[in-house]
Each structure stands twice: as C-alpha cells, then as structure tokens.
C-alpha cells in the first residue's frame, strides 16, 4: 500500500469508528441512608408575680444519640445539653434583667420516663436595664418525679420523587412532672425558691430511611 493511499484511508477509518462507537457509562449506584435518633428531655419553669415585679425561670435538658448509616458507613453522635434562662422585670420603676446560658456536659439521668435528675454548672450571661453585662456561674441540682398520666403519639410520612424515596417514622411519650431542688447563682441566690413550678419528662424515638438515585 503506497503512502498516498494510507494517508487518504486513515481519516475515513477514524470517522467510521467515531460514528459507530459510543462509550458505555454505567449509572451511579443508588445511595441508601438510614438515620435514627433516640433521646429524652426534661423541662421545668418557675414564676412569681407581685404588684410590680414578675420573675420567671426556665430550664431544659436533653440527651440523645443519633446514628447515620450511608450504605455501609456508620457514624454516631451522642450529646447531653442543658439550657437555662431567667428574667426579672419591674413595671413600677422600669428596671429589668435577663440571663441565659447553655452547658454541653450536663449530667441527666432518666429512669423509665418516671424519674429524672439533672446536675450541671452553667455560665450565664446576664444583661440588665442599666446596660452592664455580667457573667454568673449557676449550679443546677434538680429532681423530677413524673405523674401517673402519660401522653404518647406517633407519626409516619412517606415521600417519593424522581430522585428517590424516603420514609420517616416518629413516636414519643410525655409526662407532667414535679421538679424540686435548687438553681443557685454564684452559689448563693436560689432562683426557684418560693416560685410556682411546672415541669415534664418526655422521650422520643424517630428515624428515616432514604434511597436516592444520584
């Protein structure tokens, strides 16, 4: 085969191959994600109201463990957190104060949604009507005793789209509770002494399964 013939033939062969050859690209596999969370909560609030002064205290604490599995890879997160806020306002002289803070190392123990103890120290940032911010150390030591009546509920939801589908389930239990103990500011002032109280203990268990086609 002479040089001229080979030179003329090669472009034709390349055109034939590019015309009839289509690369095969495999579809990306679907991703299955499983998410589960199980936790408990306690909440309590106290208040008092006089002719001029209104005071309120609120505390909430939760412990939860969540687990996520994407295909065969697992990850777990556990946390126990407490939130505290309190306020005092005097409508007669116009003064007020407000404090809030959180703790990520609270000790919360709950027994069968009937009894609970909460112990922690929270650094609270307090602001008042004068404009002077002050930081306080607040020691929390509380006991919760639930009443005999419990409330429970559950739900299920399903979603579907061209990208995939998912199912979400949730159930929980709630009980009114009486909380006793102390919440002391700087080891001296008990924020809840002499105030009326309302509390509760609750639990939740929820999760979802999703399959997404990327």
Image (cartoon, rainbow, N blue to C red):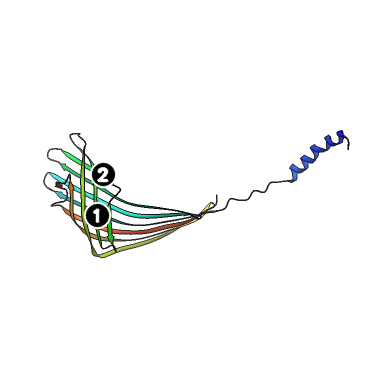
Task: Give the residue pinned by disc 2.
Answer: 101
Task: Give the residue pinned by disc 1.
Answer: 118
Helix, strand or loop at label 1? It is strand
x and y percentages locating residue 184 in the rendered image: 17, 48
User: 132 above or below 68?
Assistant: above
Q: Is residue 159 visible?
A: no
Residue at coordinates 25% horizontally, 54% vertically from top-left?
Answer: 43
User: 102 above or below 134?
Assistant: below
Which label sits in the foreground, 1 or 2? 1
User: 92 above or below 39?
Assistant: above
Q: Estimate the spatial distance between the alpha carbons at disc 1 and disc 2, rounded to whole Å.
A: 16 Å
Q: Is residue 19 left or right of residue 145?
A: right
Q: Earlier in the sequence, mark 1 or mark 2?
A: 2
Nearer to us in this view, 157 or 66? 66
Nearer to us in this view, 6 or 151? 6
Residue at coordinates 13% horizontally, 44% vertically from top-left?
Answer: 53
Residue 111's image quarter? bottom left
Residue at coordinates 21% horizontally, 44% vertically from top-left?
Answer: 137
**Which residue of the protein is positioned furthest toward the left in this rendering?**
51
Q: Is residue 184 left or right of residue 203?
A: left
x and y percentages locating residue 31 in the rendered image: 52, 53
Helix, strand or loop at label 2? It is strand
Q: Is label 1 in contact with label 2 (beta carbons under 8 Å)?
A: no
Residue at coordinates 80% horizontally, 38% vertically from top-left?
Answer: 10
Image quarter (top left, top right, bottom left or bottom right) of the N terminus: top right
Residue 35's image quarter? bottom left
């Amino acid at each position: 085969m002479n040089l001229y013939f080979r030179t003329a033939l090669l472009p034709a062969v390349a055109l034939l191959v590019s015309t009839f050859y289509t690369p095969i690209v495999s579809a990306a596999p679907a991703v299955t994600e499983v998410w589960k969370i199980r936790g408990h909560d306690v909440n309590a609030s106290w208040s008092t109201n006089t002719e001029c002064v209104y005071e309120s205290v609120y505390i909430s604490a939760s412990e939860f463990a969540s687990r996520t599995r994407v295909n065969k890879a697992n990850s777990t997160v556990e946390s126990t957190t407490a939130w505290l806020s309190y306020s005092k306002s005097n409508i007669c002289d116009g003064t007020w104060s407000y404090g809030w803070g959180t703790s990520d190392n609270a000790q919360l123990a709950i027994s069968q949604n009937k009894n609970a103890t909460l112990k922690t120290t929270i650094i609270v940032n307090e602001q008042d009507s004068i404009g002077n911010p002050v930081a306080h150390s607040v020691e929390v030591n509380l006991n919760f005793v639930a009443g005999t009546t419990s409330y429970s509920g559950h739900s299920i939801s399903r979603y579907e789209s061209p990208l995939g589908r998912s199912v979400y389930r949730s159930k929980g239990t709630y009980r009114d509770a009486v909380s006793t103990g102390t919440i002391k500011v700087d080891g001296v002032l008990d924020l809840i002494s002499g105030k009326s109280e309302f509390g509760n203990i609750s639990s939740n268990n929820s999760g979802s399964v999703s399959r997404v086609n990327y």
